[in-house]
């Protein structure tokens, strides 16, 4: 039975290397499949982090402008929170 197997497959180094590849690819806790999934998740999280960093900078810029400019603060309060003066009426137009 062992005579029918090609000599390459009977080689100790081939068998050891093959078993090592199987171990690294499928069995180990840090196998290649898990590492691929983790690296793709890491890329997604880094992209999300960059997005939120950009949004934080925009909000900080807007906040700084609002705190220094009273007219802009009043405009923001009127548009965002529908605030008004006592002598005014507010009409909200909703577009379809």
Image (cartoon, rainbow, N blue to C red):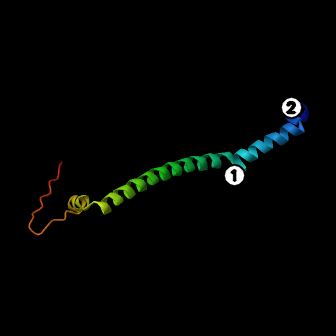
Crowding around mark 2 (Cα neighbors within 10 Å: few <14, some 14 to 19, many 20+) is few
Q: Residue furthest bottom?
A: 86
- Whichever of callouts 2 and 1 sits on the residue coming sooner in the sequence is 2
Instruction: Please state the horizontal and vertical placement of residue 24, each as a whole percent of the image.
Output: 73, 46
Distance in Å between CA atoms under marks 2 and 1: 29 Å
Q: Are marks 2 and 1 in contact (CB under 8 Å)?
A: no
Q: Give whichever of 31, 58 is nearer the camera.
A: 58
Task: Name the quadrant containing residue 7.
Answer: top right
Question: Which residue is rendered at x = 15% and y = 65% of the image?
Answer: 84
Does residue 85 lie above or below 22 as drawn?
below
Task: Name the quadrant containing residue 71.
Answer: bottom left
Question: Which residue is rendered at x = 15% and y = 57% of the image?
Answer: 92
Question: Which residue is rendered at x = 12% and y = 58% of the image?
Answer: 91
Instruction: Please state the horizontal and vertical placement of residue 69, each as a whole percent of the image.
Output: 27, 60
Q: Give whichever of 5, 28 is nearer the camera.
A: 28
Which numbered marker is on residue 92?
Answer: none
Q: Give whichever of 81, 63 is nearer the camera.
A: 63
Q: Residue furthest right?
A: 3
Instruction: Please state the horizontal and vertical placement of residue 89, each as a whole percent of the image.
Output: 9, 63
Question: Which residue is rendered at x = 45% and y = 54% of the image?
Answer: 52
Is any part of residue 1 visible from this angle? no
Crowding around mark 1 (Cα neighbors within 10 Å: few <14, some 14 to 19, many 20+) is some
Q: Secondary structure at mark 2?
A: helix
Q: Is residue 35 left or right of residue 58?
A: right
Task: Name the quadrant containing residue 4.
Answer: top right
Q: Which residue is mark 1?
A: 30
Figure label count: 2
Q: Secondary structure at mark 1?
A: loop
Q: Which residue is mark 2?
A: 8
Quarter the N terminus occupies: top right
């Amino acid at each position: 039975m062992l005579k029918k197997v090609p000599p390459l497959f009977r080689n100790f180094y081939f068998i050891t290397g093959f078993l090592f590849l199987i171990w690294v690819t499928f069995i180990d806790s840090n196998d290649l499949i898990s590492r691929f999934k983790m690296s793709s998740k890491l890329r997604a999280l880094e992209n999300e982090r960059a997005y939120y960093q950009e949004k934080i900078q925009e909000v900080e810029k807007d906040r700084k402008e609002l705190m220094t400019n009273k007219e802009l603060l009043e405009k923001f309060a009127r548009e965002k929170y529908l605030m008004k003066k006592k002598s005014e009426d507010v009409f909200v137009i909703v577009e379809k």
